Amino acid sequence: MRPSDLAREHGLSTQAVRNYERDGFIPAAERTDSGYRIYTEVHAAALRAFLALVPAHGHSAAGQIMRALHADAPGNAPADALDDALTIIDRGHHQLLRDRETLDAVRRAVDHLMAEAGTTPATDRPTGASRSTGDGPPTGPGRSTGADRRTIGELAHRLQVTPATLRTWENAGILTPARDPLTGYRLYRATDVRDAELAHLLRRGGYPLDHIATVVRQIRTAGGTDTLSDALDDWRRRLTARGLAMLDAATHLSHYVSLLGRGP
């Protein structure tokens, strides 16, 4: 096969195919005596697998998966290629499951908050008198402020984001942590963790901060939930599409792995 043969199937340019080869997404091509590339069905299967992985796991992870499979190709250092590729895939499935669980938790929270709107004690909300710029001492997963409260470090670790990200969300009105009355340090309650999980999910879906703030306010007030329902319905459709894309990608990748002769 020529580069144009691979490109034509997917509506790509021949340069894109060469770039994918350069980046390790498909195996290196054999060359004729005159230097022209020669592709085989293995290369075609690799390209199909990579392009199927992109909507399932994202461009970056798709590239990592394919490069992992090619890591022990001739001329490269030995590597446990298949295990490395499967580990990346497993992370994608884990993230999808976590997104689904977060979405379900938000749905349940809305049902509960419909009956509890306006009943949050004033002492559980931050006030101007108690606010400070302090974030507390460095904390990690091993340090706790209580079963129902987390420090900024603990919440950042849970979400795998930086404390600066949480402060940005707070400035946007997405998070409203309480403050320790003695130190002024931020303390995140269960409802704050829920809001942060939702914000994290929606940010991965490409939602702007002001839209996320609107959705979170809908949850807090449990009134006029059209905006919230539309956002959650849209994200559920996205999760379903990603799950189906993962199934499709698995089919193409399994075929490619079999062509490579990989297996237990």
Image: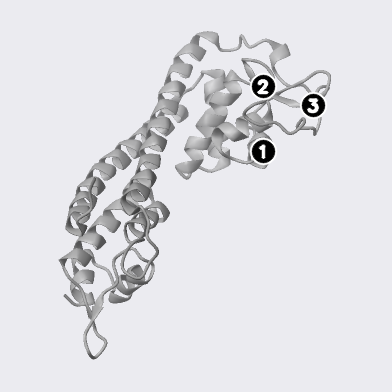
Dot 1, crowdedness within 10 Å: few (<14), some or many (≥20)?
some
Along the polypeptide, which appears first: circle 1 or circle 2?
A: 2
Q: Quadrant of residue 4?
A: bottom left
* Circle 3: element type: loop
| Horizontal and vertical percent position of residue 120 | 63, 12
Task: Give the left or right position of residue 161, taking residue 13 as reference.
Answer: right
| Residue matched to label 3 | 131
Residue drawn at the location 23% of the way across and 76% of the way down = 3
| Horizontal and vertical percent position of residue 137 | 77, 31
Instruction: In the rendered view, tell whether residue 15 sits above or below residue 255.
Output: below
Is residue 164 something that shows in the picture? yes
Comparing 73 with 206, the one in front is 73
Residue drawn at the location 51% of the way across and 14% of the way down = 113
Q: CA distance from mark 3 to mark 2?
A: 21 Å
| Horizontal and vertical percent position of residue 43 | 22, 66
Q: Amino acid at mark 2?
A: Ser
Q: Quadrant of the N terminus?
A: bottom left
Dot 2, crowdedness within 10 Å: few (<14), some or many (≥20)?
some
Along the polypeptide, which appears first: circle 3 or circle 2?
A: 3
Q: Amino acid at mark 3?
A: Arg
Q: CA distance from mark 1 to mark 3?
A: 17 Å
Name the colour scheme: one colour
Is residue 174 something that shows in the picture? no
Instruction: In the rendered view, tell whether residue 153 sits above or below residue 222.
Output: below
| Residue matched to label 2 | 144
Q: Quadrant of the C terminus?
A: top left
Of circles 3 and 2, the one toward us is 2
